[in-house]
Image (spheres, grey):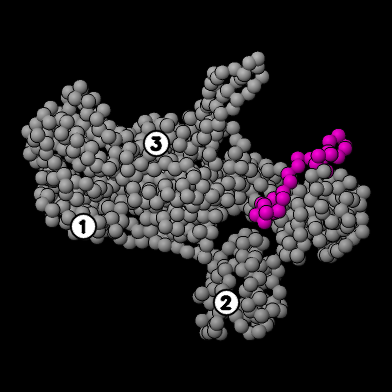
């Protein structure tokens, strides 16, 4: 039968699912509009199934049906209306329109009491029976022939809450265990109700809910157990050290891990017969903040309670089972996301919680098939935690969520200034959590904590604040064109967001690379699906948590840890992705560019490899040149896209420069990145460490002089010695190829030979960055004009700023991060011409 569902709430969602399960075709769902960007559960379920959803604020205006609304309803062709928990006034022409009319699900107490106050009138009139009613709707909606009722006794001292609690919300989903079943059926019932409402039974005269069921293969009767009488069960349960063993009518057994009592207290089932122990719990700052949020939620439900204390009993304060659903919905709306984290105590003198699942459509979820992988701490080579490993189906879900958020969601309708406020709020949250983010960055990427705090995290915060300010300043222009005489013309341009954008980032600056691209992308009004590097996913997942806390609409930000060959490739190929921003190797960048072209000619920006030259003339400030030269190579352990890949030192100062550099390197402390005195941490991952060893071996083999370093440090973890090569000739492998590590490549050039050293510096297929040190400003500007690189530093290095555009030439890619130019990477220009 073709059915239109008109209603709302979790109960409406349950009725909808039952109708679908019975094989009926739902041709349309009519529910209430989104409230504060939150979608009603009934709408969420229907949209997931692709069922048309209509969200009319009202059906009638001044007592008359709204023609446009009724016409849209009639167009779905329903043969029956089903109204579960409908709070709107539905016109009778809608009620009577289908062939089979309309039926209403209602907590109506038997025939004489219908409507919102039915239970109250039942108590006022002293009825002895109550029930849940399904009936045909007639001219009053609350009267008509009864289709189905479920009865319950109304006890002498019942009140509205106690009736709801015992019976009415909602009938059929109350979770009571039927013990006259095989063990597997009982196990299925418990796990099916494991979160809401909880499978329950009566024990010792109290309702007890069961959680965490596992089927057992063998009989677990033993002397080390205590029998527990359970009314209706085929035999007593057994409280063991592992939990509570329960038995089905077939004699087989299952194990339950946790029990919850009517007062809300939950215990390990193994502790059932042990006396309760009172203890004081010390809460972290985040937990204290969460507790205050929960007090507000509780207070909104327990309006009769003056103050919510730690010992306030939810049910004894007047709450009912229906309020459990309410509180779950309110918590969900308050926090917007359920976060499952790995918790680390006393890590960098703080307790840190790290999400480890995919982040799709505002929720942390497991990957398809539950696939995971281990992310490794480069300091000791040990696993930090298991992280969900995204599959193709997860990419499809994330892109679909991003597309819906852009085309249909609150984000696409939000005005730019409000979008900016969200980005500012996100930046504030990042600042509040900066020490936690820096710690995660250190253990996941090996970044020295002090550098991570200042640069990795600090610049990320600055980036979001900078682009937040751009949100309401994105504008087109008017263009004078030839008039269409005798008429006139007005031509103007508009800057519009592209849509769904994919972002693929590297492992050297996990959060900062995310920020550089994502901030501009979001400021422009796009939605994003981001793939962090597989070896460094954790700060991206923590960032996802912060977007939820900032109340970003669902689907705007999606994070997919996974492999480049699977997740990255699918994002490159996906027809619904209209822009891809990538930072990584030139080799992979070429593959991405090809895939983006073949799939749907999607816009692409690429920040690729580099072999950045740094030219140091003999008229420089040598103290500064030595200091900045060291920084240009060893900053962030050399894992820096603009690291000086080759230093050209004028012959007259070459030996002094080398001597002073080596002297300073020997002072560097190599060690734990969380140690505040550490200068040089571990390389990012084992495969990269092995490549650095091989890189240096090639340099030695070709005849370059290894002045210091060149090998792995003899300690656990992925530590590599700061390395210096001299006498490097232009044809050598290490003169041409990027190390992406702490390896300084030094070549000398003849005194005064500016043009020749420029020719050598430019003899590379890369053009990301470059630098020059000299006191002669004319020489400096001349060299800066001739250097073929997207960034030129004069008498400084690594000096990037959120307002300054960043990007390369040649095979270092194209497109810009940072600055106003970055916005253009995530915008499209539309030209509009009007004749008047």
Q: Say which residue label 2 marks.
A: 215
Secondary structure of residue under mark 2: strand
Determine whether 104 is above or below 431 in the image.
below
Q: Do callouts 1 and 3 mark residues in contact (Cβ within 8 Å)?
A: no
Q: Say which residue label 3 marks.
A: 816
Please name the residue shown 34% across and 51% down the image. 587
Q: Earlier in the sequence, mark 1 or mark 3?
A: 1
- The disc label shown at residue 694, or none: 1
**Residue sticking out furthest to the front:** 485
Q: Quadrant of the C terminus?
A: top right
**Residue sticking out furthest to the top:** 486
Secondary structure of residue under mark 3: loop
Query: Taking 789 as reference, is 581 left or right?
Result: right
Secondary structure of residue under mark 1: helix
Query: Taking 421 as reference, is 330 left or right?
Result: right
Q: Quadrant of the N terminus?
A: bottom right
Mark 3 or 2: in front is 3
- Examine the structure image and report whether residue 53 is included in the region drawn in magenta: yes
Mark 2 or 1: in front is 1
- Examine the structure image and report whether residue 238 is included in the region drawn in magenta: no
Magenta residues (range):
41-70
Determine whether 653 is above or below 111 in the image.
above
Mark 2, Cα crowd under 10 Å, few <14 / some 14-19 / many 20+, is some
Q: Nearer the viewer, residue 773 or 422?
A: 773
């Amino acid at each position: 039968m073709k059915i239109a569902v008109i209603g709302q709430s979790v109960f409406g969602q349950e009725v909808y699912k039952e109708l679908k399960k019975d094989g009926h075709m739902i041709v349309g769902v009519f529910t209430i509009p989104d409230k504060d960007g939150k979608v009603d559960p009934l709408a969420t379920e229907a949209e997931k199934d692709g069922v048309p959803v209509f969200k009319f604020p009202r059906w009638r205006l001044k007592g008359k049906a709204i023609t446009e609304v009724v016409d849209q309803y009639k167009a779905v062709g329903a043969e029956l209306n089903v109204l579960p928990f409908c709070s709107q006034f539905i016109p009778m022409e809608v009620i009577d329109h289908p062939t089979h009319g309309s039926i209403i699900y209602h907590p109506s107490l038997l025939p004489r009491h219908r409507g919102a106050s039915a239970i109250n009138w039942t108590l006022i009139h002293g009825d002895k029976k109550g029930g849940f009613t399904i009936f045909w709707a007639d001219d009053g909606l609350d009267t008509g022939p009864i289709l189905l009722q479920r009865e319950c006794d109304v006890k002498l001292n019942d009140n509205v809450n106690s009736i709801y609690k015992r019976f009415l919300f909602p009938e059929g989903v109350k979770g009571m265990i039927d013990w006259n079943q095989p063990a597997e059926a009982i196990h299925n019932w418990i796990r099916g109700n494991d979160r809401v409402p909880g499978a329950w039974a009566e024990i010792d005269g109290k309702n007890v809910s069961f959680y965490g069921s596992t089927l057992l293969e063998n009989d677990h009767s033993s002397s080390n157990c205590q029998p527990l009488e359970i009314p209706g069960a085929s035999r007593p349960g057994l409280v063991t050290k592992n939990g509570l063993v329960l038995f089905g009518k077939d004699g087989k057994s299952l194990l339950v891990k946790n029990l919850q009592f009517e007062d809300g207290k939950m215990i390990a089932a193994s502790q059932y017969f042990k006396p309760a122990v009172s203890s004081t719990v010390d809460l972290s700052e985040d937990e204290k903040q969460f507790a205050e949020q929960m007090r507000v939620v509780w207070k909104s439900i327990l309006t009769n309670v003056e103050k919510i204390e730690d010992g306030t009993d939810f049910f004894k304060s007047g709450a009912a089972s229906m309020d459990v659903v309410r509180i779950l919905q309110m918590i969900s709306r308050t926090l917007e996301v359920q976060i499952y984290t790995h918790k680390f105590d006393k890590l960098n003198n703080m307790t840190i919680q790290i999400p480890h699942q995919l982040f799709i459509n505002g929720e942390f979820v497991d990957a398809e098939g539950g696939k995971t992988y281990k992310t490794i701490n480069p300091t000791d080579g040990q696993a930090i935690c298991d992280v969900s490993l995204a599959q193709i189906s997860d990419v499809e879900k994330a892109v679909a969520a991003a597309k819906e958020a852009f085309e249909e969601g609150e984000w696409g309708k939000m005005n730019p200034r409000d979008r900016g406020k969200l980005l500012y709020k996100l930046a504030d949250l990042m600042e509040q959590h900066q020490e936690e983010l820096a710690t995660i960055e250190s253990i996941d990427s090996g970044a020295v904590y002090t550098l991570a705090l200042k640069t990795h995290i600090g610049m990320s915060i600055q980036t979001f604040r900078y682009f937040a300010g751009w949100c309401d300043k994105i504008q087109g222009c008017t263009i004078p064109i030839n008039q269409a005489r005798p008429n006139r013309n007005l031509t103007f341009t508009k800057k519009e967001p592209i849509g769904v954008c994919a972002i693929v980032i590297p492992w050297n600056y996990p959060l900062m690379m995310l920020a550089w691209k994502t901030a501009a992308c979001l400021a422009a009004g796009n939605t994003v699906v981001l793939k962090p590097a597989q070896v460094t996913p954790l700060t991206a997942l923590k960032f996802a948590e912060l977007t939820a806390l900032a109340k970003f609409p669902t689907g705007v930000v999606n994070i997919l840890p996974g492999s480049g060959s699977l997740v990255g490739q699918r994002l490159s190929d996906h027809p619904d992705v209209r822009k891809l921003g990538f930072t990584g190797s030139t080799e992979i960048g070429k593959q991405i560019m090809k895939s983006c072209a073949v799939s749907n000619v999607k816009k692409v920006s690429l920040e690729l490899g580099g072999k950045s030259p740094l030219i140091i003339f003999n008229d420089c400030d040598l103290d500064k040149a030595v200091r900045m030269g060291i920084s240009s190579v060893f900053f962030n352990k050399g894992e820096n896209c603009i690291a000086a890949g080759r230093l050209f030192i004028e012959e007259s100062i070459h030996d002094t420069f080398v001597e002073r550099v080596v002297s300073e390197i020997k002072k560097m402390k190599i060690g734990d990145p969380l140690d505040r005195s550490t200068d040089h941490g571990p390389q990012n991952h084992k495969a990269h460490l092995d490549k650095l060893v091989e890189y240096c071996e090639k340099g030695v083999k070709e005849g370059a002089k290894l002045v210091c370093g060149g090998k792995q440090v003899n300690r656990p973890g992925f530590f590599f010695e700061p390395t210096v090569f001299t006498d490097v000739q232009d044809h050598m492998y290490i003169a041409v190829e990027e190390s992406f590590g702490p390896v300084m490549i030094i070549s000398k050039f003849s005194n005064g030979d500016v043009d020749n050293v420029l020719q050598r510096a430019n003899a590379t297929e890369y053009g990301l960055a470059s630098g020059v040190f000299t006191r002669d400003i004319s020489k400096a500007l001349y060299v800066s004009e001739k250097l073929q690189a997207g960034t030129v530093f004069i008498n400084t290095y690594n000096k990037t700023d959120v307002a300054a555009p960043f990007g390369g030439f040649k095979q270092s890619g194209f497109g810009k991060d940072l600055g106003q130019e970055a916005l253009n990477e995530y915008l499209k220009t539309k030209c509009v011409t009007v004749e008047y």
